[in-house]
Amino acid sequence: MEIWINPACSKCRSALTLLDAEGADYTVRRYLEDVPSPDEIRQVLDRLGLEPWDITRTQEAVAKELGVKDWARDAGSRERWIEALSAHPKLIQRPIITAEDGTAVVGRSDEAVRDALSR
């Protein structure tokens, strides 16, 4: 199990606290420092069953600078979104937990973190 975190994020810290309390075996990835490649983002999206716009933090300053809210959300625009997430990792929703069964969840709630633990 791997968890993508930003240590400054309260949701990430809560997820880590819950994982520790449950005795989970996991690896921490500080994705702002160890930036995911476009291929890694594609793999995580496949595991999540989501599209890149579903995990984009559109309220971030860089999102506003790029104008992502106005970008098309279709197959033809998917790569543009993925490239933006890799170029600007602050845009990636967090924390993302990859589960043992090959799936992943966005662990913004205790329920989502427990869901990842149960897989």
Image: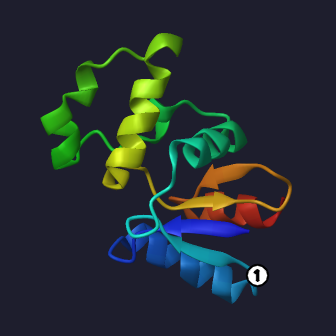
Q: Position of residue 76 (x, y in %)?
A: 48, 11
User: Taking 58 as reference, is 43 left or right?
Assistant: right
- Secondary structure of the residue carrying numbered label 1: loop
User: Taking 22 as reference, is 82 left or right?
Assistant: left
Against 33, is 75 above or below? above
Q: Position of residue 102 (x, y in %)?
A: 81, 51
Mark 1 is surrounded, within 10 Å at the Cα level, by few (under 14), some (14 to 19) or many (20 or more) other residues, namely few
Q: Residue at x 60, y 48 (%)?
A: 40
Q: Quadrant of residue 32?
A: bottom left
User: Taking 75 as reference, is 77 left or right?
Assistant: left
Q: Position of residue 59 (x, y in %)?
A: 23, 43
Q: Which quadrant is the C terminus positioned in?
A: bottom right
Return the residue nearer the eye: 109 or 20: 20
Return the residue nearer the eye: 93 or 81: 81
Q: Residue at x 60, y 68 (%)?
A: 3
Return the residue nearer the eye: 52 or 106: 52
Against 108, is 86 above or below? above
**Total of numbered circles in the picture?**
1
Q: Residue at x 41, y 50 (%)?
A: 92
- What amino acid does circle 1 point to? Asp
Q: Which quadrant is the N terminus positioned in?
A: bottom right
Kindly identify which residue carries mark 1: 25
Return the residue nearer the eye: 97 or 40: 40
